[in-house]
Image (cartoon, grey):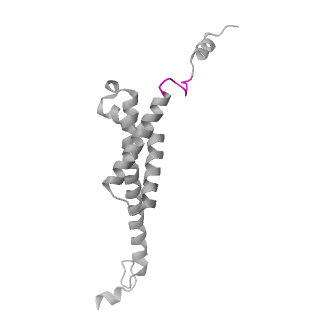
Amino acid sequence: MFDPHLVELRAIQPPSMFHELTPTLWLAKLVGAMAGSLISIAYVLPHGRREAFLRLGVGVATGVVFGGTVGAKLFDVLGLLDKISVVEMTLVGAAACSLFAWWGLGMMRRGVEGWIERKLDRGTRPNGRDGQNKHQERR
């Protein structure tokens, strides 16, 4: 028996991973991610060679993986999605993602370190805020 729904489903092809723009998009992701990482390194100087390479690696990885998505969302919010090419969108998205990846990790690190410091601070002070030794504070 002939089912028209099956014919329509077979006609829909999944997007090809190897499109004519694929090498250009990969190059845009790499260039954007490298640019964002280098700006991040130049803006906030690393403490050593190890931190510089770590920041470069994190920036390139996040820019390549999330660059297209970040670029699409960024230009959608700005209302410029139909006025810019896919390659430019990917390039800008990879650079932005790479630039802010290290800053986001740094903010999370400072937040966790502050939380741990506050937790340790409460338990180690002789007149801490945890309620121990209240009688010694009044004297």
Which residue occupies 35% across, 36% down? Answer: 74
Residue 25 x, y percent position in the rendering: 45, 31
Residue 39 x, y percent position in the rendering: 34, 49
Res. 68 in view? no
* Above or below: residue 18 compared with residue 105: above
Quick check: is 20 in the magenta stretch?
A: yes
Which residue occupies 49% across, 28% down? Answer: 22
In front: 88, or 31? 31
Which residue occupies 47% across, 50% down? Answer: 57
Main SS of the magenta segment? loop
Quick check: is 96 in the magenta stretch?
A: no
**Boundaries of the magenta span:** 14-21
In front: 82, or 35? 35
* Above or below: residue 62 compared with residue 17: below
Query: Number of marks in the image?
Result: 0
Residue 82 x, y percent position in the rendering: 34, 24
Please identify the quadrant where the C terminus is shown.
Answer: bottom left
Residue 65 x, y percent position in the rendering: 48, 41
Task: Using the rendered view, name the quadrant where residue 120 is placed.
Answer: bottom left
* Above or below: residue 127 compared with residue 33: below
